[in-house]
Image (cartoon, grey):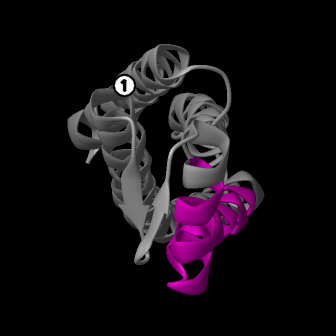
Amino acid sequence: MAQKEHREELAKIEKKDKKFDKAERQFIKHIKKSTVATEFIAQKYNKVWGELTENGTVDVANVDYNDHDSAVAAEGRRLLAQGKLDDADDYYVSAQGDYQKMKDYATDNNRQELVYAKDVLSKTGSFVSVATRPNGTFQEYTDDVYKANQRHVRAIQKLKFSYSSIK
């Protein structure tokens, strides 16, 4: 009788592990998509800000701007109209949902991955926030984006390493 109960318990754990793995794959996919969208946005802001800094004026959506607040705001409106700002946030929100599923299906076999995933979620949120809501000077913005991205990438590498070494 005890052996049967033990086998049933192992089967339950295996089923939860499989559901966790599926949620984790979705989590990684959404984090990657959020990262790509966020990097795209940062590049667009950098381009506008850099051109304005270099030339004293920049064309955003066929309008010339000579101050960074107006130029960055115009680029933000253009990115919003194109749905690009929403992409970064939407994929991040999807990753939050995936993380919640991971928590629901966590077992002793994948607790460490869950810790790494939580760190990835936190660092990705910071990266998305810093990159999509520019403020300060051009140098401050680029420095902040770079640092947030580096922290975000390191967190992803830890999760990927733990994911690939276990699977």
- Residue at image position (31%, 46%) is 47
- Residue at image position (57%, 19%) is 137
State whether residue 9 is above or below residue 138: below
Q: Which residues make up the magenta segment?
A: 72-101
- Residue at image position (37%, 62%) is 59
State whether residue 135 is above or below residue 132: above
Magenta part, dominant SS: helix
Query: From where the camera sits, is residue 70 visible?
Result: yes
Nearer to the camera, 78 or 15: 78
State whether residue 72 is above or below residue 14: above
- Residue 18: x and y in percent read 47, 68
- Mark 1 Cα-neighbour bin, 10 Å: few <14, some 14–19, many ≥20: some
- Residue 32: x and y in percent read 36, 57
- In the visual, does 37 lie left or right of 123? left
Please give the count of numbered marks on the rendered protein. 1
- In the visual, does 146 lie left or right of 140? left
Q: Quadrant of residue 68?
A: top right
- Residue 84: x and y in percent read 50, 73
Quarter containing the N terminus = bottom right
Q: Quickly name the residue at label 1.
A: 158
Nearer to the camera, 31 or 22: 31
Question: What amino acid is at disc 1?
Answer: Lys
- In the visual, does 142 lie left or right of 122? left
Q: Is residue 79 magenta?
A: yes
State whether residue 43 is above or below residue 79: above
- Residue 82: x and y in percent read 50, 84
Nearer to the camera, 39 or 155: 39
- In the visual, does 156 lie left or right of 84? left
Query: From where the camera sits, is residue 7 visible?
Result: no
Q: Is residue 147 magenta?
A: no
SS class, disc 1: helix
- Residue at image position (23%, 41%) is 164
